[in-house]
Amino acid sequence: MSTRPDEDIDGFFTTARTAGRDEAVELTDESYRTFLPDLDDPRLAQVRGMTYEEFAQDRYQAPFLRDLLAHWDGLYREPFVGITSDGTVREGLYALPGTGPSGPAPSHSASEPAEAAGRFLAMLTPGELDAVRYDVDAPQWRAWSNPEFMVYRVGLRMEVLTDDKRSAIHDVLRASLSAEGYTQVSGAMELNGHLGELVGLPTVMNRHSYWFSLFGDPAAGARGEPWGWQLFGHHVAVNFVSVGGRHVIAPVFLGAEPALADAEDGPRAPLFAARERIALELAGSLTKAQRARAVVFGSVLDPAMPKGRLHPADERHVAGAFRDNRVVPYEGIPAGELDGPQRDLLRRVVADFLDLLVEGQRALALAEYDAHVHETWFSWYGATDGSQPFYFRVHSPVLIAEFDDHAGVWLTNKLPARFHVHTTLRHPNGNDYAKALIARWRERGE
Protein backbone atom coordinates (compact mmCIF):
# COMPACT_ATOMS: atom_id res chain seq x y z
CA MET A 1 0.00 0.00 0.00
CA SER A 2 1.25 3.44 -0.86
CA THR A 3 1.45 6.04 1.86
CA ARG A 4 -0.94 8.95 1.98
CA PRO A 5 0.82 11.84 3.67
CA ASP A 6 -1.35 14.80 4.59
CA GLU A 7 1.13 17.54 5.31
CA ASP A 8 0.21 21.19 5.21
CA ILE A 9 1.86 23.08 2.34
CA ASP A 10 0.87 26.66 3.04
CA GLY A 11 -2.39 26.68 4.99
CA PHE A 12 -4.52 26.28 1.86
CA PHE A 13 -3.01 23.20 0.21
CA THR A 14 -1.96 19.84 1.64
CA THR A 15 -0.01 16.99 0.12
CA ALA A 16 -3.15 14.80 0.21
CA ARG A 17 -4.25 16.24 -3.15
CA THR A 18 -1.08 15.02 -4.87
CA ALA A 19 -0.26 11.81 -2.95
CA GLY A 20 -0.85 8.57 -4.83
CA ARG A 21 -3.18 6.11 -3.12
CA ASP A 22 -4.02 2.53 -4.03
CA GLU A 23 -7.61 2.84 -2.82
CA ALA A 24 -10.14 4.48 -5.12
CA VAL A 25 -11.31 7.98 -4.21
CA GLU A 26 -15.01 7.37 -3.71
CA LEU A 27 -17.65 10.04 -4.05
CA THR A 28 -19.74 11.05 -1.07
CA ASP A 29 -23.47 11.72 -0.93
CA GLU A 30 -22.87 14.45 1.63
CA SER A 31 -23.70 18.06 0.87
CA TYR A 32 -20.78 20.37 0.31
CA ARG A 33 -21.92 22.14 3.47
CA THR A 34 -20.50 19.22 5.45
CA PHE A 35 -17.11 20.53 4.35
CA LEU A 36 -17.60 24.20 5.17
CA PRO A 37 -14.82 25.41 7.46
CA ASP A 38 -15.50 26.84 10.89
CA LEU A 39 -15.71 30.60 10.47
CA ASP A 40 -13.33 30.91 13.43
CA ASP A 41 -10.69 28.88 11.57
CA PRO A 42 -7.46 30.90 11.92
CA ARG A 43 -6.76 30.88 8.19
CA LEU A 44 -10.10 32.66 7.69
CA ALA A 45 -10.08 34.82 10.78
CA GLN A 46 -6.64 36.26 10.14
CA VAL A 47 -7.60 37.59 6.69
CA ARG A 48 -11.21 38.55 7.39
CA GLY A 49 -11.84 42.18 6.50
CA MET A 50 -8.73 42.47 4.31
CA THR A 51 -9.05 44.19 0.96
CA TYR A 52 -8.17 42.17 -2.13
CA GLU A 53 -4.77 43.88 -2.20
CA GLU A 54 -4.06 43.21 1.48
CA PHE A 55 -5.07 39.59 1.02
CA ALA A 56 -2.70 39.23 -1.93
CA GLN A 57 0.18 40.68 0.04
CA ASP A 58 -0.58 38.27 2.88
CA ARG A 59 -0.65 35.26 0.53
CA TYR A 60 2.65 36.28 -1.06
CA GLN A 61 4.37 35.46 2.24
CA ALA A 62 3.89 31.69 1.85
CA PRO A 63 7.17 30.05 0.67
CA PHE A 64 5.29 27.56 -1.55
CA LEU A 65 3.45 30.42 -3.23
CA ARG A 66 6.57 32.53 -3.67
CA ASP A 67 8.20 29.62 -5.49
CA LEU A 68 5.10 29.10 -7.63
CA LEU A 69 4.89 32.80 -8.53
CA ALA A 70 8.54 32.81 -9.56
CA HIS A 71 7.91 29.78 -11.78
CA TRP A 72 4.82 31.39 -13.31
CA ASP A 73 6.74 34.60 -13.95
CA GLY A 74 9.37 32.66 -15.87
CA LEU A 75 6.67 31.03 -18.00
CA TYR A 76 4.97 34.38 -18.59
CA ARG A 77 8.18 35.93 -19.89
CA GLU A 78 8.78 33.22 -22.49
CA PRO A 79 7.97 34.23 -26.09
CA PHE A 80 4.56 32.89 -27.09
CA VAL A 81 4.60 29.62 -29.03
CA GLY A 82 1.35 27.87 -28.18
CA ILE A 83 0.53 24.48 -26.74
CA THR A 84 1.86 21.63 -28.87
CA SER A 85 1.79 17.86 -28.69
CA ASP A 86 5.50 17.42 -29.46
CA GLY A 87 7.18 20.83 -29.24
CA THR A 88 6.63 21.71 -32.91
CA VAL A 89 3.84 24.06 -34.02
CA ARG A 90 1.74 22.78 -36.91
CA GLU A 91 1.04 25.56 -39.38
CA GLY A 92 -2.03 26.15 -41.53
CA LEU A 93 -4.61 24.78 -39.12
CA TYR A 94 -6.69 27.93 -38.71
CA ALA A 95 -8.43 29.94 -41.42
CA LEU A 96 -10.45 33.14 -41.55
CA PRO A 97 -14.02 32.86 -42.86
CA GLY A 98 -14.19 31.99 -46.55
CA THR A 99 -10.61 30.70 -46.71
CA GLY A 100 -10.78 27.21 -45.28
CA PRO A 101 -12.97 24.44 -43.84
CA SER A 102 -14.82 26.93 -41.67
CA GLY A 103 -16.83 28.11 -44.67
CA PRO A 104 -18.61 31.47 -45.03
CA ALA A 105 -18.63 34.18 -42.42
CA PRO A 106 -21.30 33.85 -39.71
CA SER A 107 -24.25 36.20 -39.59
CA HIS A 108 -23.56 37.57 -36.11
CA SER A 109 -22.42 41.16 -36.52
CA ALA A 110 -18.89 41.94 -35.40
CA SER A 111 -20.11 45.43 -34.54
CA GLU A 112 -22.24 44.40 -31.54
CA PRO A 113 -19.35 43.59 -29.14
CA ALA A 114 -17.32 46.51 -30.54
CA GLU A 115 -20.17 48.96 -30.01
CA ALA A 116 -20.70 47.76 -26.43
CA ALA A 117 -16.96 48.18 -25.79
CA GLY A 118 -17.10 51.68 -27.24
CA ARG A 119 -19.94 52.65 -24.91
CA PHE A 120 -17.92 51.35 -21.96
CA LEU A 121 -14.83 53.34 -22.98
CA ALA A 122 -16.91 56.52 -23.30
CA MET A 123 -17.77 56.28 -19.59
CA LEU A 124 -14.19 56.15 -18.30
CA THR A 125 -11.95 58.82 -16.84
CA PRO A 126 -8.58 59.50 -18.53
CA GLY A 127 -6.80 57.51 -15.84
CA GLU A 128 -9.17 54.55 -16.27
CA LEU A 129 -8.68 54.67 -20.04
CA ASP A 130 -4.92 54.47 -19.58
CA ALA A 131 -5.31 51.48 -17.27
CA VAL A 132 -7.79 49.46 -19.34
CA ARG A 133 -6.37 49.69 -22.88
CA TYR A 134 -3.52 47.67 -24.41
CA ASP A 135 -2.17 47.09 -27.87
CA VAL A 136 -3.63 43.97 -29.52
CA ASP A 137 -0.17 42.37 -29.45
CA ALA A 138 0.57 43.32 -25.83
CA PRO A 139 2.08 40.58 -23.64
CA GLN A 140 -0.55 41.30 -20.98
CA TRP A 141 -2.89 38.90 -22.78
CA ARG A 142 -0.87 36.15 -21.13
CA ALA A 143 -0.95 37.61 -17.61
CA TRP A 144 -4.31 36.15 -16.60
CA SER A 145 -4.63 33.81 -13.64
CA ASN A 146 -7.40 32.15 -11.66
CA PRO A 147 -6.57 32.26 -7.91
CA GLU A 148 -8.36 34.50 -5.41
CA PHE A 149 -5.25 36.66 -5.14
CA MET A 150 -3.71 38.59 -8.04
CA VAL A 151 -0.56 37.47 -9.78
CA TYR A 152 -0.49 40.41 -12.22
CA ARG A 153 -2.71 43.47 -12.21
CA VAL A 154 -4.03 43.98 -15.73
CA GLY A 155 -6.78 46.45 -16.60
CA LEU A 156 -9.44 47.69 -14.19
CA ARG A 157 -10.63 45.90 -11.07
CA MET A 158 -14.42 45.66 -11.33
CA GLU A 159 -15.09 45.89 -7.60
CA VAL A 160 -13.63 49.42 -7.41
CA LEU A 161 -15.69 50.69 -10.35
CA THR A 162 -19.08 52.35 -10.10
CA ASP A 163 -22.21 50.31 -10.74
CA ASP A 164 -22.81 51.84 -14.16
CA LYS A 165 -19.30 50.95 -15.34
CA ARG A 166 -19.62 47.40 -14.02
CA SER A 167 -22.94 47.14 -15.83
CA ALA A 168 -21.28 48.35 -19.03
CA ILE A 169 -18.66 45.60 -18.73
CA HIS A 170 -21.45 43.06 -18.47
CA ASP A 171 -22.99 44.60 -21.59
CA VAL A 172 -19.71 43.86 -23.41
CA LEU A 173 -19.85 40.26 -22.16
CA ARG A 174 -23.46 39.83 -23.25
CA ALA A 175 -22.76 41.26 -26.71
CA SER A 176 -19.72 39.03 -27.18
CA LEU A 177 -20.94 35.70 -25.76
CA SER A 178 -23.86 33.45 -26.51
CA ALA A 179 -26.78 33.68 -24.10
CA GLU A 180 -25.72 30.32 -22.66
CA GLY A 181 -22.12 31.45 -22.48
CA TYR A 182 -22.98 34.65 -20.66
CA THR A 183 -25.08 32.66 -18.19
CA GLN A 184 -22.13 30.34 -17.56
CA VAL A 185 -19.56 33.11 -17.09
CA SER A 186 -21.78 35.33 -14.96
CA GLY A 187 -22.89 32.25 -13.02
CA ALA A 188 -19.28 31.45 -12.15
CA MET A 189 -18.83 35.05 -10.99
CA GLU A 190 -21.95 34.79 -8.84
CA LEU A 191 -20.69 31.51 -7.38
CA ASN A 192 -17.50 33.27 -6.38
CA GLY A 193 -19.62 35.73 -4.45
CA HIS A 194 -21.55 32.85 -2.89
CA LEU A 195 -18.28 31.24 -1.77
CA GLY A 196 -17.14 34.53 -0.24
CA GLU A 197 -20.35 34.66 1.78
CA LEU A 198 -20.10 31.01 2.85
CA VAL A 199 -16.63 31.50 4.33
CA GLY A 200 -17.21 35.06 5.57
CA LEU A 201 -14.73 36.71 3.22
CA PRO A 202 -16.81 38.95 0.93
CA THR A 203 -13.98 41.46 0.54
CA VAL A 204 -11.71 38.71 -0.81
CA MET A 205 -14.19 36.84 -3.01
CA ASN A 206 -17.25 38.48 -4.49
CA ARG A 207 -19.02 38.68 -7.85
CA HIS A 208 -16.95 41.71 -8.85
CA SER A 209 -13.50 40.28 -7.94
CA TYR A 210 -12.33 40.44 -11.55
CA TRP A 211 -10.00 42.36 -13.82
CA PHE A 212 -11.22 43.63 -17.20
CA SER A 213 -9.16 45.04 -20.04
CA LEU A 214 -9.44 45.83 -23.75
CA PHE A 215 -6.87 45.05 -26.44
CA GLY A 216 -6.76 46.89 -29.74
CA ASP A 217 -9.33 49.40 -31.00
CA PRO A 218 -12.97 48.27 -30.84
CA ALA A 219 -13.97 50.97 -33.32
CA ALA A 220 -11.57 49.53 -35.89
CA GLY A 221 -12.73 46.08 -34.84
CA ALA A 222 -16.18 46.82 -36.24
CA ARG A 223 -14.42 46.90 -39.65
CA GLY A 224 -12.73 43.53 -39.07
CA GLU A 225 -9.46 44.63 -37.48
CA PRO A 226 -8.28 42.52 -34.54
CA TRP A 227 -9.37 43.59 -31.07
CA GLY A 228 -10.53 41.86 -27.93
CA TRP A 229 -11.15 41.85 -24.22
CA GLN A 230 -10.01 39.88 -21.20
CA LEU A 231 -11.80 39.09 -17.94
CA PHE A 232 -10.07 37.18 -15.18
CA GLY A 233 -10.12 36.44 -11.50
CA HIS A 234 -11.07 33.59 -9.18
CA HIS A 235 -12.46 30.67 -11.24
CA VAL A 236 -13.09 32.84 -14.30
CA ALA A 237 -10.66 33.70 -17.08
CA VAL A 238 -12.04 34.48 -20.54
CA ASN A 239 -10.06 35.85 -23.49
CA PHE A 240 -12.20 37.10 -26.41
CA VAL A 241 -10.75 38.18 -29.77
CA SER A 242 -12.54 39.32 -32.93
CA VAL A 243 -10.60 39.36 -36.21
CA GLY A 244 -11.72 39.36 -39.84
CA GLY A 245 -15.23 38.13 -39.09
CA ARG A 246 -14.06 35.43 -36.72
CA HIS A 247 -14.37 35.23 -32.92
CA VAL A 248 -11.94 33.23 -30.80
CA ILE A 249 -12.61 32.65 -27.11
CA ALA A 250 -9.47 31.00 -25.75
CA PRO A 251 -7.83 30.44 -23.39
CA VAL A 252 -10.82 29.85 -21.12
CA PHE A 253 -10.65 28.81 -17.49
CA LEU A 254 -13.96 28.31 -15.68
CA GLY A 255 -14.35 26.68 -12.30
CA ALA A 256 -16.54 26.58 -9.24
CA GLU A 257 -16.35 25.81 -5.54
CA PRO A 258 -18.95 24.72 -4.59
CA ALA A 259 -19.81 23.38 -8.05
CA LEU A 260 -22.86 21.50 -6.71
CA ALA A 261 -25.98 22.97 -5.19
CA ASP A 262 -28.08 21.68 -2.31
CA ALA A 263 -31.58 22.33 -1.01
CA GLU A 264 -30.51 25.51 0.79
CA ASP A 265 -29.22 26.96 -2.49
CA GLY A 266 -32.66 26.87 -4.10
CA PRO A 267 -33.07 26.15 -7.84
CA ARG A 268 -29.46 26.86 -8.85
CA ALA A 269 -28.26 24.23 -11.32
CA PRO A 270 -24.71 22.80 -11.15
CA LEU A 271 -22.50 24.91 -13.39
CA PHE A 272 -21.12 22.02 -15.49
CA ALA A 273 -24.00 19.55 -15.20
CA ALA A 274 -24.52 18.99 -18.94
CA ARG A 275 -20.81 18.59 -19.64
CA GLU A 276 -20.42 16.08 -16.83
CA ARG A 277 -23.51 14.12 -17.89
CA ILE A 278 -22.48 13.80 -21.56
CA ALA A 279 -18.91 12.90 -20.65
CA LEU A 280 -20.08 10.17 -18.26
CA GLU A 281 -22.44 8.84 -20.93
CA LEU A 282 -19.51 8.60 -23.32
CA ALA A 283 -17.19 7.01 -20.75
CA GLY A 284 -19.89 4.56 -19.71
CA SER A 285 -20.44 3.49 -23.33
CA LEU A 286 -16.85 2.33 -23.81
CA THR A 287 -16.28 -1.35 -24.44
CA LYS A 288 -13.75 -3.22 -22.36
CA ALA A 289 -11.16 -2.85 -25.12
CA GLN A 290 -11.93 0.85 -25.59
CA ARG A 291 -11.78 1.45 -21.86
CA ALA A 292 -8.35 -0.12 -21.70
CA ARG A 293 -7.20 2.53 -24.20
CA ALA A 294 -9.13 5.54 -22.94
CA VAL A 295 -8.58 5.19 -19.19
CA VAL A 296 -5.02 6.37 -18.71
CA PHE A 297 -5.10 6.14 -14.90
CA GLY A 298 -7.52 4.15 -12.79
CA SER A 299 -8.19 6.99 -10.36
CA VAL A 300 -7.50 10.69 -10.04
CA LEU A 301 -4.80 9.86 -7.47
CA ASP A 302 -3.46 6.75 -9.14
CA PRO A 303 0.01 5.99 -7.67
CA ALA A 304 1.10 5.00 -11.19
CA MET A 305 1.12 8.66 -12.23
CA PRO A 306 4.68 9.80 -12.99
CA LYS A 307 6.43 12.26 -10.72
CA GLY A 308 5.27 15.79 -11.45
CA ARG A 309 2.00 14.78 -13.12
CA LEU A 310 0.03 16.06 -10.12
CA HIS A 311 0.49 19.65 -8.97
CA PRO A 312 -0.80 21.08 -5.66
CA ALA A 313 -2.46 24.02 -7.44
CA ASP A 314 -3.33 22.60 -10.88
CA GLU A 315 -3.91 19.00 -9.74
CA ARG A 316 -4.45 17.17 -13.07
CA HIS A 317 -5.25 19.94 -15.55
CA VAL A 318 -2.39 20.85 -17.88
CA ALA A 319 -3.71 23.87 -19.81
CA GLY A 320 -4.29 26.45 -17.11
CA ALA A 321 -2.72 29.82 -16.36
CA PHE A 322 0.78 30.47 -17.75
CA ARG A 323 0.79 27.18 -19.70
CA ASP A 324 0.71 28.87 -23.11
CA ASN A 325 3.76 26.94 -24.37
CA ARG A 326 3.29 23.59 -22.69
CA VAL A 327 4.07 20.39 -24.56
CA VAL A 328 1.11 18.05 -23.96
CA PRO A 329 1.43 14.65 -25.68
CA TYR A 330 -1.72 12.92 -26.89
CA GLU A 331 -3.02 10.18 -24.62
CA GLY A 332 -6.01 7.89 -24.36
CA ILE A 333 -8.01 6.59 -27.30
CA PRO A 334 -8.10 8.07 -30.82
CA ALA A 335 -11.58 9.15 -31.93
CA GLY A 336 -11.23 6.83 -34.92
CA GLU A 337 -11.51 3.88 -32.53
CA LEU A 338 -14.90 5.09 -31.28
CA ASP A 339 -18.11 4.13 -33.03
CA GLY A 340 -20.46 6.65 -34.61
CA PRO A 341 -22.68 7.31 -31.55
CA GLN A 342 -19.59 7.63 -29.35
CA ARG A 343 -18.05 10.17 -31.73
CA ASP A 344 -21.35 12.05 -31.62
CA LEU A 345 -21.13 12.15 -27.82
CA LEU A 346 -17.53 13.35 -28.02
CA ARG A 347 -18.60 16.15 -30.38
CA ARG A 348 -21.37 17.14 -27.95
CA VAL A 349 -18.77 17.43 -25.19
CA VAL A 350 -16.67 19.66 -27.46
CA ALA A 351 -19.72 21.75 -28.41
CA ASP A 352 -20.43 22.32 -24.73
CA PHE A 353 -16.88 23.61 -24.19
CA LEU A 354 -17.40 25.96 -27.18
CA ASP A 355 -20.73 27.16 -25.81
CA LEU A 356 -19.38 30.64 -25.01
CA LEU A 357 -19.30 31.42 -28.75
CA VAL A 358 -22.41 32.76 -30.47
CA GLU A 359 -24.09 30.23 -32.73
CA GLY A 360 -22.44 31.08 -36.07
CA GLN A 361 -19.02 31.39 -34.51
CA ARG A 362 -19.47 28.11 -32.66
CA ALA A 363 -20.22 26.46 -36.02
CA LEU A 364 -16.87 27.71 -37.37
CA ALA A 365 -14.98 26.30 -34.38
CA LEU A 366 -16.82 22.98 -34.64
CA ALA A 367 -15.98 22.81 -38.36
CA GLU A 368 -12.30 23.06 -37.43
CA TYR A 369 -12.79 20.30 -34.88
CA ASP A 370 -14.59 18.14 -37.47
CA ALA A 371 -11.76 18.63 -39.97
CA HIS A 372 -9.37 17.01 -37.48
CA VAL A 373 -11.66 14.52 -35.74
CA HIS A 374 -9.50 11.56 -36.77
CA GLU A 375 -6.54 13.24 -35.10
CA THR A 376 -8.52 13.75 -31.89
CA TRP A 377 -7.84 11.84 -28.67
CA PHE A 378 -10.02 11.25 -25.62
CA SER A 379 -8.49 10.40 -22.26
CA TRP A 380 -10.03 9.62 -18.87
CA TYR A 381 -8.72 9.28 -15.31
CA GLY A 382 -10.88 7.42 -12.78
CA ALA A 383 -13.88 5.10 -12.86
CA THR A 384 -16.18 5.50 -15.86
CA ASP A 385 -19.44 4.78 -13.99
CA GLY A 386 -19.75 8.04 -12.02
CA SER A 387 -18.78 6.45 -8.71
CA GLN A 388 -15.54 8.44 -8.40
CA PRO A 389 -14.26 11.93 -9.13
CA PHE A 390 -12.70 12.05 -12.58
CA TYR A 391 -10.59 13.97 -15.06
CA PHE A 392 -10.95 13.93 -18.83
CA ARG A 393 -9.31 15.61 -21.79
CA VAL A 394 -10.30 16.05 -25.43
CA HIS A 395 -7.19 16.86 -27.47
CA SER A 396 -6.83 17.57 -31.17
CA PRO A 397 -4.56 19.77 -33.30
CA VAL A 398 -7.08 22.63 -32.90
CA LEU A 399 -8.57 22.08 -29.43
CA ILE A 400 -7.64 20.97 -25.95
CA ALA A 401 -10.46 20.81 -23.40
CA GLU A 402 -10.21 19.57 -19.81
CA PHE A 403 -12.52 18.80 -16.91
CA ASP A 404 -11.05 18.07 -13.47
CA ASP A 405 -12.63 17.34 -10.09
CA HIS A 406 -10.47 18.99 -7.42
CA ALA A 407 -9.86 18.80 -3.72
CA GLY A 408 -11.17 21.65 -1.62
CA VAL A 409 -9.36 24.94 -1.21
CA TRP A 410 -11.94 26.84 0.81
CA LEU A 411 -14.04 23.74 1.49
CA THR A 412 -12.29 21.20 3.69
CA ASN A 413 -12.49 18.06 1.53
CA LYS A 414 -8.83 17.07 1.24
CA LEU A 415 -9.43 14.66 -1.64
CA PRO A 416 -10.95 15.44 -5.05
CA ALA A 417 -14.74 15.64 -5.17
CA ARG A 418 -17.42 17.13 -7.37
CA PHE A 419 -17.69 20.10 -5.02
CA HIS A 420 -14.76 21.79 -6.79
CA VAL A 421 -14.36 21.71 -10.58
CA HIS A 422 -11.82 23.27 -12.95
CA THR A 423 -12.29 23.35 -16.72
CA THR A 424 -9.97 24.69 -19.41
CA LEU A 425 -10.19 25.32 -23.15
CA ARG A 426 -7.30 26.09 -25.49
CA HIS A 427 -6.58 26.26 -29.22
CA PRO A 428 -3.20 24.53 -29.62
CA ASN A 429 -0.61 25.19 -32.29
CA GLY A 430 -0.64 28.92 -31.81
CA ASN A 431 -4.24 30.14 -31.88
CA ASP A 432 -4.76 30.99 -28.23
CA TYR A 433 -5.61 34.71 -28.11
CA ALA A 434 -6.37 34.24 -31.88
CA LYS A 435 -2.70 34.77 -32.61
CA ALA A 436 -2.67 32.42 -35.62
CA LEU A 437 -5.74 34.10 -37.11
CA ILE A 438 -4.33 37.56 -36.50
CA ALA A 439 -1.24 36.46 -38.44
CA ARG A 440 -3.48 35.24 -41.30
CA TRP A 441 -5.36 38.56 -41.29
CA ARG A 442 -2.11 40.48 -41.56
CA GLU A 443 -0.92 38.24 -44.37
CA ARG A 444 -4.05 39.20 -46.30
CA GLY A 445 -3.01 42.85 -45.89
CA GLU A 446 -6.41 44.06 -44.75
Image (tube, rainbow, N blue to C red):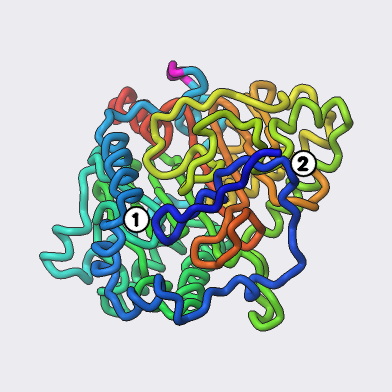
Q: Nearer the viewer, residue 427 or 34?
A: 34
Query: What segment carries the magenta color?
Result: 87-92
> Residue at position x 35%, y 78% from top?
48
- Left or right: where does residue 243 sit relative to residue 362? left
Direction left: furthest residue:
126
Residue 162: quarter of image? bottom left
Q: Amino acid at mark 2?
A: Leu
Is residue 169 placed above or below 75 in the rendered structure? below
Q: Is residue 347 visible?
A: no
Residue 23 left/right relative to 87: right
The vertical placement of 245 against 52, above or below, is above
Residue 185: numbered disc = none
* Residue at numbered disc 1: 114
Identify the mark at residue 345; answer none if there is no mark: 2
Residue at left offset 52%, top offset 22%: 85
Residue closer to the observer: 24 or 123: 24
Q: CA distance from mark 2 to mark 1?
A: 35 Å
Mark 2 surroundings: few (<14), some (14-19) or many (≥20) residues within 10 A:
some
SS class of the residue under badge 1? Answer: helix
